[in-house]
């Protein structure tokens, strides 16, 4: 039986969040096409980071800097959770190594079931099909530091919009993430 909060979430909230995400993506693509060429080493760079907490709880996070103000990101977690998102930076990152950003990440997660002590749930077992999955939206505000040699760290926190709270870190109403990795500069 479907209750009214599920109908509200599916018909009103989720489509509006996806619409906002698509608008931000179009703005990012437009800015990238009309941006002037600069000597900025941040633009067109790609970061590969290990992510702790956040949508995947534990996973790999890739952040591609489409321009000085926007980056596209995606992640894949240990439990085959995944996200795709967009970050908008409040300052041009060629001026500083430290920048504030706001983001939007749409993700799909699976319920963690601790069976026989497996930390990451029932991955690969015969009960995998019994786990539930759901779509969520994470809207973080965070900061990024990128050293001249490429070391990168991101820390963010924000509201998490998800239908059911399963008692996991990635289904709480507020969530945060820590990402540590390396930024690969574009070849000149």
Image: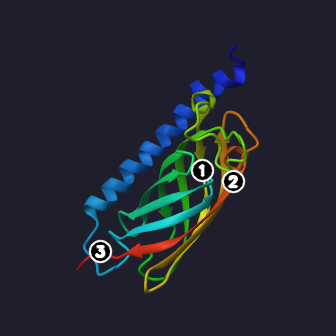
Is residue 123 something one can see in this rendering?
A: yes
34 sits to left or right of 4: left
Crowding at mark 3 (Cα within 10 Å: few <14, some 14-19, many 20+): few
**With respect to residue 187, does 50 lie above or below?**
above
For the N terminus, which image quadrant? Answer: top right
Please report the residue visible at 71 percent of the width from the left and 40 percent of the height from the top: 115
List the single residue furthest toward the bottom.
148
Q: Quarter of the image holding residue 162?
A: top right
Q: Nearer the viewer, mark 2 or mark 1?
A: 1
Q: Position of residue 98 (x, y in %)?
A: 54, 79
Q: Disc 2 designates what residue?
A: 175
Which circle marks residue 55 in the picture? 1
Q: Disc 3 designates what residue?
A: 186
Q: Are marks 3 and 2 in contact (CB under 8 Å)?
A: no
99 sits to left or right of 155: left
Crowding at mark 1 (Cα within 10 Å: few <14, some 14-19, many 20+): many
For the C terminus, which image quadrant? Answer: bottom left
Sequence-earlier tag: 2 or 1: 1
Is residue 92 something one can see in this rendering?
A: no
* Secondary structure at numbered mark 3: loop
List the single residue furthest toward the front.
116
Please report the residue visible at 67 percent of the width from the left and 58 percent of the height from the top: 176
**With respect to residue 150, does 79 lie above or below?**
above
Q: Are marks 2 and 1 in contact (CB under 8 Å)?
A: yes
* Secondary structure at numbered mark 2: strand
């Amino acid at each position: 039986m479907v209750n009214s909060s599920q109908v509200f979430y599916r018909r009103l909230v989720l489509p509006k969040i996806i619409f906002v995400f698509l608008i931000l993506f179009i703005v990012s693509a437009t800015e990238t096409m009309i941006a002037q060429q600069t000597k900025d080493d941040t633009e067109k760079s790609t970061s590969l980071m290990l992510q702790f907490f956040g949508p995947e709880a534990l996973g790999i996070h890739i952040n591609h800097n489409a321009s000085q103000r926007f980056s596209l990101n995606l992640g894949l977690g240990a439990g085959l959770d995944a996200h795709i998102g967009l970050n908008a930076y409040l300052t041009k990152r060629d001026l500083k190594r430290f920048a504030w950003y706001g983001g939007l990440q749409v993700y799909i997660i699976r319920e963690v079931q601790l069976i026989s002590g497996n930390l990451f749930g029932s991955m690969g077992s015969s009960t995998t099909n019994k786990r539930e999955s759901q779509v969520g939206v994470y809207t973080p505000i965070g900061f990024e530091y990128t050293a001249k040699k490429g070391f990168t760290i991101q820390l963010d926190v924000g509201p998490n919009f998800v239908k059911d709270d399963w008692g996991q870190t990635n289904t709480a109403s507020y969530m945060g993430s820590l990402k540590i990795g390396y930024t690969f500069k574009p070849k000149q």
